[in-house]
Amino acid sequence: MRVFLCEKPSQGKDIARVLGATGRGEGCIRGQGVVVTWGIGHLLEQAPPEAYDPQLKSWSLDALPILPASWKVEVKAKTSSQFKVVKALLREATELVIATDSDREGEMIARELLEHCSYRGPIQRLWLSALNDASIRQALASLKPGAETFSMYHSALARSRADWLIGMNFTRLFTLLGRQAGYSGVLSVGRVQTPTLRLVVDRDREIAHFVPVPFWSLDVLLAANGQTFTAQWRPARDITDDEGRCLDQRHAQAAQARVTAGSTAIAVSVETERVKEVAPLPFDLGTLQEICSKKLGLGAQETLNVAQALYETHKATTYPRTDCGYLPTSMLPEVPAVLEAIRRMDPSIAPVLASLDPAQRSRAWNDAKITAHHGIIPTLEPASLAAMSDKERAVYSLIRAHYLAQFMPHHEFDRTVAAFDCNQVALRAVGKRIVVPGWKTLFLAAPAAEDDEDSKEKDRSQILPPLQNASRAQVQQAQLKAQQTQPPKPYTEGDLIKAMKTVAKLVTDPRLAAKLKETTGIGTEATRASIIQGLIDRGFLLKKGKAVRASDAGVSLIAAVPPAVADPGTTAIWEQALDMIEAGTMQLDDFIAKQGAWIGKLVAQYRQTTLSIKVPEGPSCPLCQGKMAQRKGKSGDFWSCLRYPDCKGLVNIETSKVKGKGGPGKARRSGASA
């Protein structure tokens, strides 16, 4: 019997429909000689420390580091019934087709089950890029040998075990050290979450410590050939900073005094350049999250949820968890079908489709750039726009526009830079005249998804009058502006996703920078959103409008942990190692052994450390006058003596009622077991 193992029930139903399997069973769908079953995400999980040693259930500095000699997994309690179904079907299977999501994590979901259930039969891999019927049929006709994707499992296993080692050891270590310092919360440490938090803490510090520098600019309104336009003063280099700003008001005032109304400015050079802007690539997930944050106000996880719904529920777009914006040339023959599906979904777009050139090959069609998945594009079968929510339609429109842009002309404009002299004051005017709107017409009626122009140039998007060398212009007005340098902007979720993707650019350690590829980030397309959301849920990050800021607890955590643990460069090196495991150039066991040795060294180094950590100011202990820590009990928060259990002083926060030895048992027990 041929068993198809999917990642989730909805995926199983889609594949069963194409296979012609209709017999509903418990946790599966049966057909002629075939059965489709599924996980519900992971059916197994890494075993907790107490599975290795019951004494490890209690947190103790003396028990660290925890380094399993052989790894254990456990069946998830919530989905144990589905695990039993899969296990029974694997006993019947004569052939197994892995049909989970086509990525590192999907590979692990399936392989960990096969390993745990001791399946030893033949394995093939279904590699899906979309869940519409045509794509499933195409993938079924070209199954991969199971061995071809096995290294992805080891890469995912390395990620899972490294996360466990770092999370279990450092969370216990710094939480226990925090308690000694009076901090009652859990200081959660993660391989990716802590460096991500560090990015925000560093940005917040830059903003807090930023000292504005005053500078002066001069905008001059000129008139020539019956048209007015604006030019800017270009101060000499010896009176500017590295950014070309004049920091001395006296020089700016002197320039203004020379450029008076009625003065003549003479063009000393006029240069016009034809600029061609190529269409943006189809989306990878990170870019989609960045743009949806910027243009639609969606959070990173919210964007992923919408993209997943477009893929899984509506069958309107291809696989979303991709790190690649390029398309394989093998998909070129499908272009007419995709365009027809788009037209049938939305007849109002017919005029746009009529202006396309389906035979045009943009830079997006590049086999050499394809990774495990291609860019997110519409599928070749029509879906229902009416069935989508407003957010789903907005995201779909952006994805559609980026695909259609591949078949439109370049955006072309003439950029003119005119330099003037006015009484020995240098001025410059920049003009822009659109020649061919091209692909940008797609974004006129929708939130623009292409990169914004440089803000300074955007302000100067004006059409200049006809000019040539020695052209004369009259000064209408000269306005002196007192300005200040601006601090960096706080991260939005979209900005943070981008920073995680391009973290190699932020690494200042020359040793790490030399090892890092420019493309190496932290986290994956599939996990970055959940990492950010996890930091928000734990209270380490705070949402303030669109901005993401670090909380006091987040700042304290980054101050407490070893710099290497919080360094995005270190984590990026590990991500690079995971890629090497997937490529077969590094062994799983070697990677984990190095992680264990490094963790053991840091635990030994920090075990005796006294943390300097910000804690809420509490009352003195009513019994010994010592410090108290805020604890959580079943009846709410309370203050407990740091010397507990030697001293049992308690203060109820809500009533400020002091309790001594005879205090309420529930609160006291809750404090003791925290």
Image (tube, grey):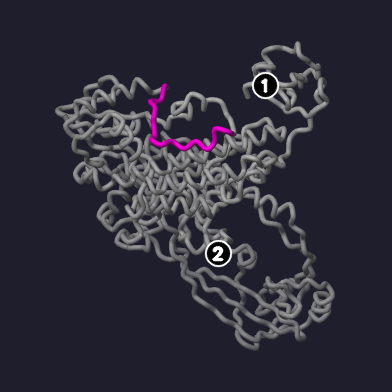
Vertical comparison of 635 with 201: above or below: above
The answer to whether residue 76 is magenta is yes
- The correct choice, above or below, for 430 with respect to 409 in the image is below
Main SS, magenta residues: loop
Q: Which quadrant holds residue 178? A: top right
For this view, does 563 lie left or right of residue 106?
Answer: right
Q: Which residue is mark 1?
A: 671
> Residue 638's image quarter?
top right
For mark 2, what is the residue? Answer: 510
Residue at 22% x, 39% y is 123
- Indicate yes or no whether the magenta region holds residue 299: no
Can the viewer see residue 432?
yes
What residue range appears in magenta? 62-77
Residue sticking out furthest to the bottom: 470
Amino acid of disc 2: Pro
Q: Amino acid at mark 1?
A: Gly
Residue at figure coordinates x 83%, y 79% from the top left: 254
Classify the position of the C terminus by image quarter: top right
Residue 558, horizontal then vertical, whole percent: 64, 45
- Front in this rendered view, residue 471 or 327: 327
Distance (Cα) linking label 1 and label 2:
46 Å
Which is nearer the eye, 341 or 215? 215
